[in-house]
């Protein structure tokens, strides 16, 4: 008999269709093209082609190099085809019976490496750390702009995940409204706190460590686990053990720990599912939240292995054919080749 | 400058990226394979292959023919790979900190025609009417089961829309919970009524008829229009002019009118976008709603022309590159070949 499971935060139900359970190999198809070149003359994100992008907003680069020239390790620019404009007034108004405002916000690209073909599983931890620092630095910069209400860091990888440029990059979009999806999580956190007097994500992290059946990786500060009500096969969340509303307030040590577990998780997914297309989203508190209570930041990774159809569109109930306990076991047990050895999980000081 | 528009019911925002506006031809790709055969020996939905499906639950067929033999025009069976089980108790319970229940419900297939290659745009109106009658009859049957809380009728067309069998069919799924997405619409309807003392969908239908700029088709009882906050290019809603919570309470005349506008709308989409993949969902009241106040049924058609990515997953804010006013104009102005002539819109008796 299939099972219905409820997301503990959003209260969305998921159908777990155990009878149709699938193995990782069932999802292996021709993955995204993995470039073998370090440089592609036509790629605007490659080192040497800096003139093809808007001017850089941030770069971690060799001390003696000038902006918008080679020598950077991570580089952030405006998105050339930005969905939202950096300049202008919000000008919210009624149009007949409807509600509109100007598309003011920000849309930036984080170019993760000068190397055209180097994805997260192939990076050193230090390189992943710098990507996360770029997220934090840009987040903290944009947060100063009082017109902006929410800032989402996300990554699309592979064509099925809506990615059009193969050079490794993430994106940052800042919106002048708080998205409904974020509200529904905030409301979930608040209601759980009223009811149980604790943070739901803290409770989930504690429970998943204790139970272990959905755990994928763990270090001093973080866990990676398959959520109990996984909407998609191999959905994976990275949750900090320490309660913190906003990711951009991480300490230097926490950034290193997060880089370690992010790289390990991406490597496990890469090996288990043969380089799957995926999206990840970094869910964090709203810009104007001055309380630590109403959110607990985390990263959600969704491999794009199935196509949501009419049922999902109409109900937002997802049908998932891989129980998260199976997904977690496959990801835990994946064999990691010597050449890609994991560094030892860092020991927490806390 | 891009524009942010708010959905009047769900309060979800949409980014309308006018600068990147696209024409219908930009979305024309190799559409779903259009079978030219009337019969495919390997297709379980073809007339003559009735033994390949579970026994029929309903069929409109020639009087002298027996169940599960040829002679039917529309046929409904259980889905062979049902996501939910017809038998069993709900048995809702806690598992540690989480909430689960048995996957009890229904999952049926409406085989729309015995003809392997005949899609809605190519049908006579009478044929479309019978599909709608099948939706109504099965809805009213399932509604008697007190374990079921919501029933969704939907259709997936084309591989990009999650459809695996090309023979024209729709699906019906009944769930033992009210989906969150449905709640959010009900709440929107209720809040609008508190605020303005009228039904939001009645108000939208009135406004769209008066304004005309997003209108695609109209007959005595219905309008087809592009919603003001369209999430996807060429999204189209069919809304009854008369307030009614549940579609399955339509009168005979209303069914005929709905069939007329559904066929016309599907034909316009088919011609304008060269046979696009799409999902449609028939949003209706919850099973146990005994008031006409809290919902107004309607059909939402979403052509699958773009790939939602990390930003949409993280925020549920969609970025749409085709303003609904442009989409509606393209669909209104599409040239309809003589061979596919539309019947005259029916005159309403009311």
Image (cartoon, coloured by chain):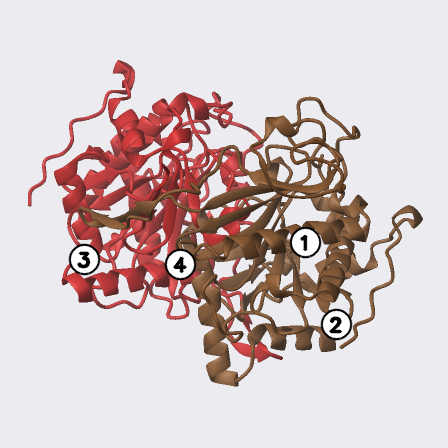
Chain colours: A brown, B red
Q: Earlier in the sequence, mark 1 or mark 2?
A: 1
Q: Are marks 1 and 2 in contact (CB under 8 Å)?
A: no
Q: Badge 2, how many Cα within 10 Å: few under 14, some, many 20+?
A: some
Q: Which residue is mark 4?
A: B181
Residue A132 got which mark? 1
Q: Nearer the viewer, mark 4 or mark 1?
A: 1
Image: A332 above or below B68: below
Task: Kindly identify which numbered label has been placed on residue A212.
Answer: 2
Chain for disc number 3: B
Of residue A139 and residue B192, the one placed in the foreground of this image is: A139
Chain letter of disc 4 in the image: B
Could you say whether the residue bearing mark 4 is in a helix, strand or loop? Answer: helix
Disc 1 with disc 2 on a shared chain: yes
Residue A45's image quarter?
A: top right
Mark 3 neighbour class, 10 Å CA radius: few under 14, some 14 to 19, many 20 or more? many
Q: Secondary structure at mark 1?
A: helix
At a point 68% along the width and 77% down the height, the residue shown is A206
Q: Residue furthest top?
A: B338
Locate residue B49, reporting x and y percent: 52, 36
User: Along the line of sight, which residue is nearer the eye, B260 or B243?
Assistant: B243
Q: Are marks 3 and 4 in contact (CB under 8 Å)?
A: no
Specify the label residue B199 is tagged with.
3
- Mark pair 3, 1: CA separation: 47 Å
**The C terminus of chain B lies in which quarter of the figure?**
top left
Taking the image as shown, residue B222 lies to the left or right of residue A122, namely left
Residue sitting at x 50%, y 57%: A143
Q: Which mark is residue B281?
A: none
Residues A13 and B346: in front is: A13
């Amino acid at each position: 008999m299939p099972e219905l499971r409820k997301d503990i935060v959003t209260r969305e139900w998921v159908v777990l269709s155990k009878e149709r359970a699938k193995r990782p190999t069932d999802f292996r198809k021709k993955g995204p093209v993995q470039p073998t070149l370090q440089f592609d003359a036509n790629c605007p994100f490659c080192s040497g082609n800096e003139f093809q992008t808007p001017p850089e907003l941030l770069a971690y680069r060799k001390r003696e190099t000038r902006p918008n020239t080679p020598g950077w390790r991570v580089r952030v620019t405006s998105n050339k085809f930005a969905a939202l404009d950096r300049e202008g007034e919000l000008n919210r108004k009624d149009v007949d019976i409807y509600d509109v405002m100007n598309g003011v916000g920000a849309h930036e690209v984080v170019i993760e490496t000068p190397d055209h073909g180097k994805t997260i599983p192939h990076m050193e931890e230090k390189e992943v750390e710098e990507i996360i620092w770029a997220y934090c630095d840009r987040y903290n910069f944009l947060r100063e702009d009082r017109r902006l209400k929410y800032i989402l860091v996300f990554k699309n990888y592979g064509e099925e995940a809506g990615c059009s440029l193969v050079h490794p990059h993430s994106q940052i979009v800042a919106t002048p409204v708080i998205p409904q999806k974020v509200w529904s999580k905030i409301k979930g956190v608040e209601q759980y706190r009223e009811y149980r007097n604790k943070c739901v994500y803290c409770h989930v992290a504690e429970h998943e460590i204790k139970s272990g059946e959905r755990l994928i990786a763990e270090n001093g500060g973080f866990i990676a686990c398959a959520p109990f009500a996984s909407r998609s096969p191999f959905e994976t969340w990275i949750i900090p053990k320490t309660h913190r509303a906003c990711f951009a307030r991480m300490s230097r040590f926490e950034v290193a720990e997060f880089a370690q577990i992010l790289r390990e998780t991406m490597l496990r997914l890469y090996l288990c599912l043969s380089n799957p297309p995926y999206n990840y989203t970094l869910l964090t508190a709203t810009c104007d939240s001055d309380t630590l209570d109403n959110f607990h930041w985390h990263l959600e990774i969704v491999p794009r292995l199935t196509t949501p159809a009419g049922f999902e569109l109409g109900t937002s109930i997802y049908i998932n054919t891989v129980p998260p306990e199976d997904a977690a076991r496959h990801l835990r047990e994946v064999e990691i080749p010597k050449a890609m050895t994991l560094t030892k999980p860092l020991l927490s000081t806390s």
